[in-house]
Image (cartoon, rainbow, N blue to C red):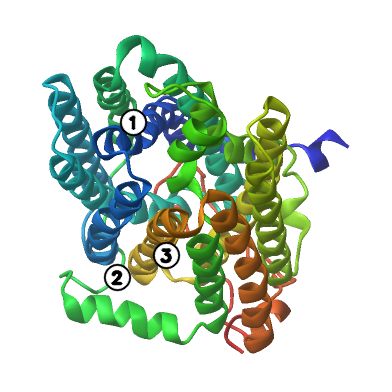
């Protein structure tokens, strides 16, 4: 019974995956400290959620450009080497954040510029990391591996913000940035231990033509296109995190220097996601994954409506916990949706274009929330935080239902009954991973 309910840990038997997964526990916690520190510093400098929302633009532009280019690079370069370079860049950027905060910087544009550089390295790192999974794991373990990765990420997203809420008043923002840069050493060690991961396709350059080839391939897969569309709807209309500093301070009474409400708000989605990940043993048995994604996004939208209602009902401790509960529910739904969408992409794409498609996926998954930051930041300034959150939730539900009606192939999508087997050691980076057939279930 427990094996069918709790998370499937089979991928952890693979040495390469286990090292990456364990190291990410430390790295994600450190990274989440910066996720809280950057908007907090921007709000401290400007006292405006609109500027916090503007950070979404500074993050989105490099995410788009370098995400697409990084995906192309992952198809023509050794993925291990590319991960080493991009991870080192992330660490150096974190040191830059630490230096400017330690020197007492009050120029918001310097913070925004560092954020743009950081996101450029992230945009190269993320598609490369995702594209290597099918090279070190058999296809039947990808759902479990994605669930494990998302669970540890969300665990860090709980611990990081809670620690940030405690540490900001005690040690200041600079120390949070320094911890993040040190934590990245764990990922560098795990990546260094990987075997070489040379390209398998015929492409030998990462230019505009190669990126366009990836889009041409994606155009033949309507289900994957639909998975991107519904995620954009969920994140652009339904990501209220740019309003968290204002909600924490003005609604729930956090001190100006930061407090526990801010940390709890940032951690609330991840609490639900971790619970969803711990009890994710049933995910591999879901065949109609498109329907599951639509259902999860509807739940996400309704949870945001409840969150907005709680924020607008007063600043008592009771309403804070109710608001956190709605965000936790939304986090669980989002985690399940993301696990299915990641697995669809990894299973459908062939290895020679997988990096480029993961680049597009990174732009959508990471860029959507940045657009959400922008829209919610300005919406909060115009109509208030409660109305912005609840209204966004309503738009999520309406938008995803319209998308499902317009793209019925996504709702009909189901995992093929026959799952190809993989031979050879799962510890080998060159282990063969058979691709699922591109039948009508994928491209109708």
Numbered label attached to residue 37: 1
Residue 441 makes an appearance in the image: no
Q: Where is residue 288 in the image (x, y as percent from the top left)?
A: 74, 70
Q: Tell me: 113 left or right of 331.
A: left
Identify the residue under disc 2. Answer: 201
**Label 3 near label 1: C-beta < 8 Å?**
no
Closest to the camera, between mark 2 and mark 3, is 3
Q: How many labels sit on residues?
A: 3
The mark lying in front, picked from 2 and 1, is 1
Residue beneath the point at 63% across and 43% down? 311
Label 3 belongs to which residue? 364
Q: Earlier in the sequence, mark 2 or mark 1?
A: 1
Of the two numbered discs 1 and 3 on the same chain, state the one appearing first in sequence. 1
Pointer 2: residues within 10 angstroms few (<14), some, or many (20+)? few
Instruction: Between residue 267 and residue 29, name the one nearer to us.
Output: 267
Q: Where is residue 392 in the image (x, y as percent from the top left)?
A: 57, 62
Q: How far apart are marks 1 and 3 (CA)?
A: 24 Å
Q: In the image, 303: left or right of 160?
A: right
Q: What element carries label 1?
A: helix
């Amino acid at each position: 019974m427990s094996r069918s309910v709790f998370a499937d840990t089979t991928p952890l038997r693979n040495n390469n995956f286990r090292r990456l997964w364990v190291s990410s526990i430390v790295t994600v916690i450190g990274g989440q400290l910066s996720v809280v520190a950057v908007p907090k510093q921007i709000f401290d400098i400007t006292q405006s959620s609109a500027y916090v929302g503007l950070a979404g633009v500074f993050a989105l532009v490099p995410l788009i450009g370098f995400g697409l280019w990084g995906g192309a690079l992952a198809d023509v370069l050794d993925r291990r080497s590319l991960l080493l370079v991009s991870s080192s860049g992330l660490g150096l950027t974190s040191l830059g954040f630490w230096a400017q905060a330690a020197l007492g910087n009050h120029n918001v544009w310097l913070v925004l510029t560092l954020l743009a550089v950081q996101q450029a390295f992230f945009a190269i790192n993320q598609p490369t990391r995702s594209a290597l999974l099918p090279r070190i794991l058999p296809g039947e373990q990808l759902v479990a591996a994605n669930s494990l990765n998302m669970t540890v990420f969300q665990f860090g997203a709980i611990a990081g913000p809670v620690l940030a809420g405690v540490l900001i008043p005690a040690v200041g923002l600079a120390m949070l940035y320094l911890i993040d840069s040190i934590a990245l050493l764990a990922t560098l060690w795990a990546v260094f231990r990987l075997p070489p991961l040379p390209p398998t396709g015929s492409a030998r350059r990462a230019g505009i033509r190669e990126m366009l080839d990836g889009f041409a391939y994606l155009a033949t897969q309507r289900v994957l296109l639909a998975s991107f569309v519904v995620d954009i709807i969920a994140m652009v209309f339904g990501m209220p995190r740019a309003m968290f500093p204002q909600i924490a301070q003005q609604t729930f009474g956090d001190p100006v220097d930061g407090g526990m409400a801010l940390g709890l708000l940032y951690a609330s989605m991840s609490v639900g996601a971790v619970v969803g990940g711990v009890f994710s043993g049933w995910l591999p048995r879901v065949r109609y994954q498109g329907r599951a994604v639509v259902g999860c996004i509807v739940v996400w939208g309704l949870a945001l409506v409840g969150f907005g209602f709680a924020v607008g009902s007063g600043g008592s401790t009771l309403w804070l916990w109710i608001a956190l509960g709605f965000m936790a529910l939304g986090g669980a739904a989002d985690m399940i949706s993301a696990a299915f969408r990641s697995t669809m992409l990894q299973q459908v794409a062939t290895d020679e274009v997988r990096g480029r498609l993961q680049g597009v996926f990174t732009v959508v998954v990471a860029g959507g929330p940045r657009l959400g930051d922008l829209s919610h930041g300005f919406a909060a300034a115009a109509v208030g935080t409660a109305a912005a959150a609840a209204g966004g939730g309503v738009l999520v539900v309406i938008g995803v239902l319209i998308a499902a009606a317009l793209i019925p192939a996504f709702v009909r999508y189901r995992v093929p009954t026959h799952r190809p087997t993989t031979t050879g050691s799962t510890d080998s980076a060159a282990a063969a991973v058979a691709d699922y057939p591109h039948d009508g279930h994928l491209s109708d």
